[in-house]
Amino acid sequence: MRDKREYQSAKDAMVKNIIFIDGMATAKEAVDLMREKNIEALIVEKRNEHDAYGIVVVQDFIKGVIIQERTSEEVNVFEIMTKPVVSVPGKMDVRYVARLLVRTGLRMAPVEEDGKYIGMISLSSIILDNLSF
């Protein structure tokens, strides 16, 4: 039996599949891309260098399309995304990542290293994809 859990970074627990989308894309285009890539979130590209990244997740389609009784073709991603996106450093311990996600009500966040997004980490990846759990 182990006494303490070993250190594991966000980079160790992340999924490397990170996909970007333009904010002008429709919700339908976004969902089609998510299905194709088998992912649950897209990073919304910056409009310019002074802008912030956004994120669109499955729950955003529920709240912004289905509950609003709109069609996925008439809603643009920028209308339903969360912006700015909350990211975590690649070296952050997964314990703190999990705590941050739970406290902020988020389910996932991009992992950042040297100013670039290198992957996505989620509550489920911390547990289900973590072989040392």
Image (cartoon, rainbow, N blue to C red):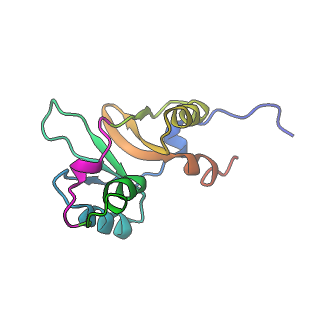
Give the residue at the far right of this rendering. 1
In this view, 15 is above or below 8:
below
Instruction: Give the magenta part as a residue range.
Output: 73-84
Q: Name the one closer to the observer, 23 or 38.
A: 23
Q: Is residue 44 left or right of residue 60?
A: left
Image x and y of residue 56, in percent: 33, 50
Q: Name the one closer to the observer, 89 or 29.
A: 29
Image x and y of residue 116, in percent: 31, 37
- The residue under the point 73% across, 34% down is 5
Residue 102: image quadrant is top right
Decide whether residue 83 is among the magenta residues.
yes
- The residue under the point 19% across, 52% down is 22
Q: In this view, does 74 lie to the left or right of 54?
A: left
Magenta stretch secondary structure, dominant = loop
- The residue under the point 64% across, 32% down is 7
Decide whether residue 28 is among the magenta residues.
no
Q: Name the one closer to the observer, 54 or 27.
A: 27
Q: In this view, does 73 lie to the left or right of 10?
A: left
- The residue under the point 38% across, 36% down is 112
- Please identify the quadrant where the N terminus is shown: top right
Image x and y of residue 37, in percent: 37, 65
Q: How many labels does the image show?
A: 0
Image x and y of residue 45, in percent: 22, 45
